[in-house]
Image (spheres, helix red, strand yellow):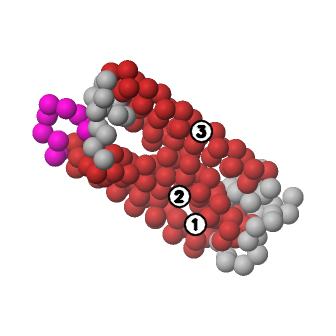
Amino acid sequence: MTPDLTAPAARRRSAAAAGLVGAGVMAAVDEIVFHQVLAWHHFYDRGTPDLALLSDGLLHAAELLALVAGFFLLGDLRRRGALVVRAAWAGVLLGAGGFQLFDAVVDHKLLRVHQIRYGVDLLPYDLAWTASAVVLLLAGAAVWASARRAAPEGGGPSGSRASGGTTGGGTPGRDA
């Protein structure tokens, strides 16, 4: 199947679709580990327990929507031969880091919908939460830069195959 996207467009779409997956995975980890297993907080802690539980359910619905949409978009890119795998991995890391940074800055500090944990000194938790976001974002940026260097700017996304990407059912690192 002939790709209908240029290499830069295929990279961007691969990263964006995978970014939804990354944000959804990080939301799931946050919800499962911190909301359910450790019970440190709910998505919205400034109301009744029923409202807190409802807010967790809405977060779960949004996380599932992001995962399903991201995987459908990735599947469509793969079907059309336009998936750039390295750019998709960059998107997963950038999406996860973006979710984590948004949660740390906007949810915890600006809107104060919840804190990481209650009844403890928040500084170590805030630093660890934000540092994990920065590490994910830096790793995603490094993989993105690698994806940009690996593929030529002109033509279709097939240039990414030669250096570790794949655009469909082929073997990574092997031209079809």
Considering only order in the chain, which callout, 1 or 2, is on the residue closer to the N terminus?
Answer: 2
Q: Residues within 10 Å of mark 3 (few under 14, many from 20)?
A: some
Question: Which quadrant does the N terminus fall into?
Answer: bottom right
Gap in angstroms between the C-alphas marked 1 and 3: 27 Å
Magenta part of the chain: 115-124
The local secondary structure at tag 3 comes to: helix
Q: Are the two marked residues, 2 and 1, in contact with CB atoms closer than 8 angstroms?
A: yes
Question: Which quadrant does the C terminus fall into?
Answer: bottom right
The tag on residue 53 is none
The local secondary structure at tag 1 comes to: helix
Q: Nearer the viewer, residue 124 or 103?
A: 103
Q: Are the two marked residues, 3 and 2, in contact with CB atoms closer than 8 angstroms?
A: no
Q: Position of residue 166 (x, y in %)?
A: 70, 57
Q: Residues within 10 Å of mark 1 (few under 14, many from 20)?
A: many
Q: Position of residue 8 (x, y in %)?
A: 66, 71
Mark yes or no: residue 37 visible: no
The local secondary structure at tag 2 comes to: helix
Q: Quadrant of residue 149?
A: bottom right
Q: Amino acid at mark 2?
A: Ala
Q: Amino acid at mark 3?
A: Leu
Taking 54 as reference, is 106 left or right?
left
Badge 3 is on which residue? 65
Q: Please say if 13 is above or below 6.
A: above
Taking 123 as reference, is 29 left or right?
right
Badge 1 is on which residue? 147
Considering only order in the chain, which callout, 3 or 1, is on the residue closer to the N terminus?
Answer: 3
